[in-house]
Amino acid sequence: MEPLKLGTHIEGWQDMIELLIATWIVFSPFALGFWNNPSAGLTALAIGSGAIFISQLGLAKQQPWEEWANLALATTLIISPWLFGYAAVAIATWSAIVSGGMLATMAIVSMVSEYNEMHQIHGPQLKH
């Protein structure tokens, strides 16, 4: 058995981590106590639910668009305190920034992994 190399794709591990992060996003308003702020609570619930759905699709069958969709959701979550007017709720703001940052990081890691995997299989596309 060969040791795992940096950039090696293991089927679905990124989607599983994205699924865990998305699940946290859904439960964070209850766990951190900001459900009483409708903007913060509903934003986390909607974005987390969307990311759960996309991550489950990714676990079923890898699609390039799913990482872009999770990156878009993560970006929306990061800017949501200012976009939806709950930036004054510190715990909700920090939760959105940290959770969104983690989701975005995993989406980017997954994109880079897929890019590297494609170039390892097909090699660089040189035109003569």
Image (tube, helix red, strand yellow):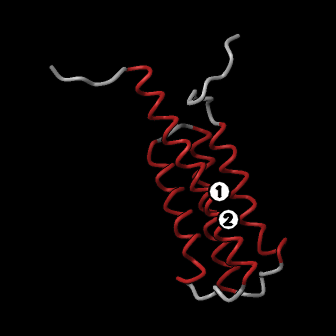
Q: Position of residue 80 (x, y in %)?
A: 57, 77
Residue name at image x 54 percent, y 63 percent: 73
Q: Give the secondary structure at mark 2.
A: helix
The answer to whether 99 is drawn above or below residue 42 in the figure is: above
Of the 4 image quadrants, the one containing the C terminus is top left
Q: Which mark is residue 80?
A: none
Residue matched to label 1: 102
Q: Nearer the viewer, residue 119 or 31?
A: 119
Q: Compared with residue 124, is residue 91 higher up or lower down, i.e. above or below?
A: below
Badge 1 local density, few (<14 within 10 Å), some, or many (20+)?
Answer: some
Q: Secondary structure at mark 1?
A: helix
Kind of residue sitting beneath label 2: Val
In this rendering, position of residue 18 left or right of residue 128: right
Q: Residue at x 24, y 23 (%)?
A: 126
- Above or below, comparing residue 51 to residue 77 in the picture: above
Determine the CA span between mark 1 and mark 2.
6 Å
The answer to whether the residue labelled 1 contacts the one labelled 2, judged by CB atoms less than 8 Å apart, is yes
Up the image or down, 56 lies above or below 33; here it is above
Question: How many marks do you count on the picture?
Answer: 2
Name the image quarter holding residue 90: bottom right
Q: Report x, y in % for residue 106.
A: 60, 48
Q: Quadrant of the N terminus?
A: top right
Residue, far top: 1
Q: Of all residues shown, which one is farthest toward the left?
A: 128
Residue 91 vs residue 69, the one in the foreground: 91
Q: Position of residue 7 (x, y in %)?
A: 56, 30
Q: Which residue is mark 2?
A: 98
Please give left or right for residue 27 compared with residue 43 in the image.
Answer: right
- Amino acid residing under circle 1: Met
